[in-house]
Image (cartoon, grey):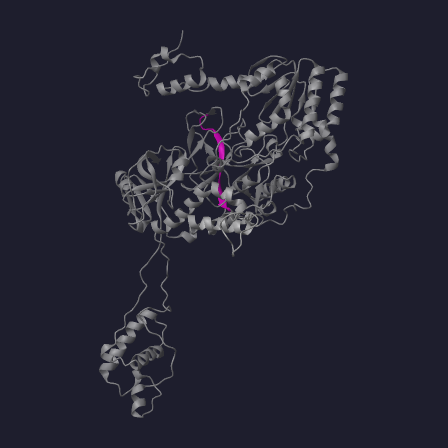
């Protein structure tokens, strides 16, 4: 920029003041910067940040574009290389009426014989029907007409063929030189990918077989997603054109499985690949895999046959298939088992379901004992089996032949059913009568065991009436009274893949109930339309209707895929042991629970695009508040509650575990005072409690498998029984893991089991102690 007092003259004059950078020039500089980096980058930025550019300038988005520059360039390179890696063949059906390259067409002419016209005879007929034309020429023209009709189709009339001959003769082409080159399009061209699915641990992967690839490759984002070890490699590889090099990150070696057969894969890790895994000739030869394209069949080691594609794809499409809304029960194996945290269990799906399909998994709430595992999720079955991960922090004991979960078929959002006539109108429905919200505090259980005097019971009831807004079900969320606070989804460098949204195939009544749940939460501000908040949804998360043990249903959204691509947020989570010690010393206690705790935490606008959901009938919505299972929601809840009740936590009169809130004291008067301070702080921040889950001065309560009883705490019999029913470790590796995990005071160096030369697969021998 020009500065005053400089040596540069502008139109013969020295500037008197320093030149300022105008917004338009700043935008032009940023646009030029994008063009110099990559010529396709401005179009991609316009597509990706179209919503923001409506209200912001390009220069103001430069910091955000700079941070996402690597992913934008990767997307451009991926789109460019995908065109080279696979030749896109357009399926051109044979059309007999189409124009052919080798033929010369003219407009339809009147009947005129060129020979008779030159001789002065009547010429109102075609040359081919002229009686003065020699027989040899008639035979030649007949052959020409036969060849031409084969090219253009049997529907061409004889008149048009004669017109062709007239045009040939007008061009002074003798009959002896007439040659028609037919440009036929009868070669069948059809692009069909040969693929099958296999498991790596609990991850279902799709392997695309390429008989022309000399090396196997895996996309770098897929390798990071499944967590394989990537080693450095000095290999170099070219794309299908033989010129363009591939951007190789490294190489990896791991084992896949399908139908009990292990498949060894050695692949190069590349950044730009149009499929997740491209399995080449080395993979097919080492694992004895054969392809039969005419039968759409893949044979693995002459044992397993996998069908890919279908010659009748239209009949098998979801548009023509009958929707089956039945829920299928998953039965556990014939032997009892324990699924440890982070491990998975493999289970057979019913034979009525296709062996390789996408299923919706739900917990079986009708069982004798309700479980929170498995959580609702979308899972891919492989060869009639499904693998479910224990994403909880406690072991899950599965009894033999137990029905522990249900599965349903899924459908894409494009094939969602039409809205019924009896669905409620979101604009006219009042889910909660606001005139009676001040009476909800009466649902609080005050002194159920008669431990307090009547005077103290009255004081507690008056205190609840004073802070009745805290127990209102019409929660509006945190109001920012103690400072701005928003939860966020901390996405990593790799964005989640774009896929079609899916929903379980529920019956009509359940779909209406699911829509009503969406409408109810939208009235409370949990959901909003994307255009209302000015964002473009980039990922659709599946939602489920889960039956509650107390009756009714609740809405659950599975954020598993988004969570795998997000980075964990650092936070100091509460220690269960120290929390239990704090609660154990109280003589009197109040147990409460936040009303839909995560729904009361506002969500940052930049994170809403990853938290989209598809309603059954009203289109796409986005979360504007946190939700259970959303990445970063637990950290946000912990941080917000520390800011609201942090002073009471420091004094030792309040304890919290997730959305559970405990208030205690050594005397009833002290408990009353502490409870008033807590309610005052909650009301000031706009946080609400559940009145039906609030109990004041109980004699005993159960907290995470421990029983509190008036200043003492003991283990629950159910918790002890679960540990007693776990099978003993049968190998050295299993015993080591158990000792390191559960026995903190063990001295492993004094045991033979922890010597380096001890085989980890050696079986343990257990003896009864007499």
Q: Is residue 725 left or right of residue 198?
A: right
- Of residue 678 and residue 176, the one placed in the foreground of this image is 678
Q: Residue furthest bottom?
A: 120
Instruction: Name the image quarter holding residue 478.
Output: top right
In the image, 274 versus 270, the foreground residue is 270
Q: Which quadrant of the figure has residue 91?
A: bottom left
In this rendering, does residue 537 appear at all? no
Residue 562: x, y in percent? 49, 37
Nearest the eye: 577 or 350:
577
Image quarter in which the C terminus is found:
top left
Residue 217 sits in quarter:
top left
The percent coordinates of residue 565 (x first, y second) are 46, 36
Magenta highlight: main SS: strand
Residue extending farthest to the top is 770
Residue 120 location in percent, x, y? 31, 93
* Left or right: where 752 falls relative to 715: left
- Magenta region: which residues? 398-412
The residue drawn where x is 32% and y is 81% is 166
Residue at figure coordinates x 58%, y 35% from the top left: 626
Above or below 556: residue 413:
below
Nearer to the camera, 235 or 342: 235
For the question of whether residue 33 can be seen, the reply is yes
- Residue 394 rendering spot, x and y as whole percentages: 49, 24
Counting the numbered discs, the total is 0
- Residue 624 belongs to magenta span: no
């Amino acid at each position: 920029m020009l500065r005053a007092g400089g040596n540069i003259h502008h139109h013969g004059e020295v500037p008197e003041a320093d030149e300022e950078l105008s917004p338009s020039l700043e935008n032009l500089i940023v646009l030029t910067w994008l063009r110099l980096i990559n010529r396709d980058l401005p179009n991609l930025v316009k597509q990706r940040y179209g919503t923001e550019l409506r209200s912001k300038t390009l220069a103001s988005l430069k910091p955000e574009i700079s941070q996402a520059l690597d992913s934008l360039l990767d997307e451009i390179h991926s789109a460019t290389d995908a065109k080279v890696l696979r030749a896109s063949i357009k399926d051109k059906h044979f059309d007999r009426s189409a124009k052919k390259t080798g033929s010369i067409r003219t407009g339809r002419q009147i009947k005129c014989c060129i020979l008779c016209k030159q001789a002065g005879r009547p010429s109102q007929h075609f040359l081919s029907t002229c009686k003065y034309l020699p027989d040899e020429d008639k035979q030649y023209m007949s052959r020409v007409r036969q060849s031409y009709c084969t090219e253009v189709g049997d529907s061409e009339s004889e008149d048009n063929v004669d017109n062709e001959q007239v045009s040939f003769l007008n061009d002074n082409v003798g009959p002896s030189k007439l040659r028609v080159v037919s440009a036929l399009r009868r070669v069948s061209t059809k692009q069909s990918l040969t693929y099958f699915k296999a498991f790596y641990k609990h991850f279902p992967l799709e392997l695309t077989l390429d008989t022309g690839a000399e090396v196997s490759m895996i996309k770098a984002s897929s390798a990071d997603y499944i967590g394989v070890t990537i080693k450095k490699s000095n290999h170099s590889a070219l794309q299908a054109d033989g010129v363009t090099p591939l951007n190789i990150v490294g190489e990896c070696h791991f084992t896949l499985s399908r139908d009990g057969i292990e498949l060894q894969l050695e692949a190069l890790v590349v950044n730009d690949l149009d499929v997740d895994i491209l399995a080449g000739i080395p993979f097919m030869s080492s694992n004895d895999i054969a392809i039969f394209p005419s039968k759409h069949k893949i044979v693995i080691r002459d044992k397993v046959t996998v069908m890919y594609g279908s010659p009748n794809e239209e009949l098998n499409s979801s548009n023509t298939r009958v929707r089956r809304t039945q829920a299928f029960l998953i039965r556990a194996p014939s032997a009892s088992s324990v699924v440890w945290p982070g491990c998975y269990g493999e289970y057979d799906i019913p034979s009525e379901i296709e062996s390789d399909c996408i299923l919706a998994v739900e917990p079986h709430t009708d069982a004798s004992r309700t479980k929170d595992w498995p959580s609702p999720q979308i899972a891919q079955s492989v060869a009639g089996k499904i693998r479910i991960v224990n994403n909880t922090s406690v072991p899950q004991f599965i009894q033999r032949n137990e029905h522990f979960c249900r599965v349903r078929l899924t459908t894409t959002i494009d094939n969602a059913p039409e809205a019924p006539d009896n669905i409620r109108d979101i604009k006219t429905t009042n889910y909660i009568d606001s005139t009676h919200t001040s009476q909800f505090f009466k649902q609080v259980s005050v002194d159920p065991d008669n431990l307090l005097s009547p005077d103290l019971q009255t004081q507690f009831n008056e205190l609840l009436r004073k802070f009745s807004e805290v127990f209102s079900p019409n929660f509006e969320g945190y109001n920012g009274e103690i400072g701005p606070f928003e939860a966020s989804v901390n996405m990593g460098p790799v964005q989640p893949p774009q896929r079609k949204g899916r929903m379980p195939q529920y019956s009509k009544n359940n779909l209406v109930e699911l829509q009503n749940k969406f409408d109810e939460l939208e009235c409370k501000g949990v959901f909003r339309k994307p255009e209302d908040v000015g964002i473009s949804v980039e990922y659709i998360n599946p939602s489920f209707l889960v039956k509650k043990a107390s009756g009714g249903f609740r809405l659950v959204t599975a954020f598993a895929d988004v969570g795998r691509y997000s980075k964990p947020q650092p936070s100091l989570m509460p220690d269960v042991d120290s929390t239990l010690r704090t609660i154990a010393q109280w003589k009197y206690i109040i147990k409460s629970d936040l009303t839909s705790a995560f729904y009361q935490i506002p969500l940052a606008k930049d994170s809403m695009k990853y938290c989209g959901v598809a309603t059954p009938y009203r289109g796409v919505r986005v979360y504007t508040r946190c939700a259970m299972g959303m990445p970063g929601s637990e950290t946000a809840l912990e941080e917000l509650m520390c800011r609201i009740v942090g002073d009471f936590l420091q004094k030792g009169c309040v304890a919290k575990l997730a959305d559970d809130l405990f208030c205690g004291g050594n005397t009833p008067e002290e408990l009353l005072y502490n409870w008033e301070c807590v309610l005052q702080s909650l009301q000031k921040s706009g946080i609400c409690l559940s009145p039906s889950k609030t109990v004041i001065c109980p004699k005993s309560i159960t907290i995470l498998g421990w029983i509190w009883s008036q200043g003492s705490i003991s283990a629950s019999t159910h918790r002890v029984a679960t540990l007693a029913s776990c099978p003993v470790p049968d190998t050295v590796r299993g015993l080591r893991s158990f000792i390191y995990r559960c026995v903190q005071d063990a001295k492993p160096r004094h045991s033979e089991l922890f010597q380096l030369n001890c085989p980890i697969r050696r079986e343990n021998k257990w003896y009864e102690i007499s």
